Image (cartoon, rainbow, N blue to C red):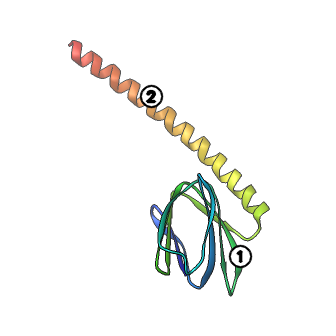
Amino acid sequence: MNLKILLPFQVFADQTGVKRIVAETREGSFGMLPQRQDCVAALCPGILVYETEAEGEAYVAVDEGVVVKTGPDVLVSVRRAMAGRDLRQLRESVEKEFLELDEEERSARSVMAKLETGFLRRFANFKHA
């Protein structure tokens, strides 16, 4: 199979010769072999596992997204992804990355709340003038 992992602004991975793929959905894990029927599934945050003849098993931590299998092609589209060969190291990297992103999101939300409040205040003053 041919596996392509897409992020919003780049191709994260483009792998050929994939023997099997295991992905996680809200209903549980499911596997894909080359002969599997075409399918579409919504992914939940978790670990996507794929195996190639040349490199063996590889692990990719993925955020929410979707997987589409059509013939020999498997497209995975997610917001964020991080690859690793060692699950322990991948887990530590994911925790660190996501904690940093959570802090950035909190900061961005705070700034947006201040902008919205200022806009509403100016709009109310404009309406009364």
**Against 61, is 125 above or below?**
above
Q: Identify the residue at horizontal 70%, vertical 83% (top origin).
A: 55
Q: Please, which residue is most extreme toward the top here? A: 128
Compute the Cα span from label 1 to label 2.
47 Å
**x, y (%) of residue 6?**
49, 67
> In this orientation, which residue lies closer to the viewer: 65 or 31?
31
Q: Position of residue 100 (x, y in %)?
A: 64, 47
Describe residue 73's horizontal placement relative to residue 90 as left or right: left
Q: Nearer the viewer, residue 51 or 12?
A: 51
Q: Residue at x 40, y 30 (%)?
A: 115
- Label ID, residue 114: 2
117 is higher (above) or lower (below) than 12:
above
Q: Which label sits on residue 83?
A: none
Secondary structure of the residue carrying tag 1 is strand
Amino acid type, callout 1: Glu
Q: Secondary structure at mark 2?
A: helix
- The percent coordinates of residue 80 (x first, y second) are 55, 58
Residue corresponding to mark 1:
57
Residue 61's x, y, as percent? 64, 61
| 11 on left or right of 88 | left
Quick one: label 2, few (<14), some, or many (20+) residues within 10 Å? Answer: few
Residue 46 appears left or right of 112: right
Could you say which is closer to the camera, residue 28 or residue 90?
A: 28
**Which residue is rendered at x = 65% and y = 53% of the image?**
97
Closer to us: 45 or 94: 45
Mark 1 vs mark 2: which is more N-terminal?
1
**Quarter holding residue 90:** bottom right
Quadrant position of the N terminus in the picture: bottom right
Which class describes the residues within 10 Å of circle 1: few (<14), some (14-19), or many (20+)? Answer: some
Query: Mark 1 or 2, which is nearer the eye?
Result: 1
Q: Is residue 29 above or below residue 106?
A: below
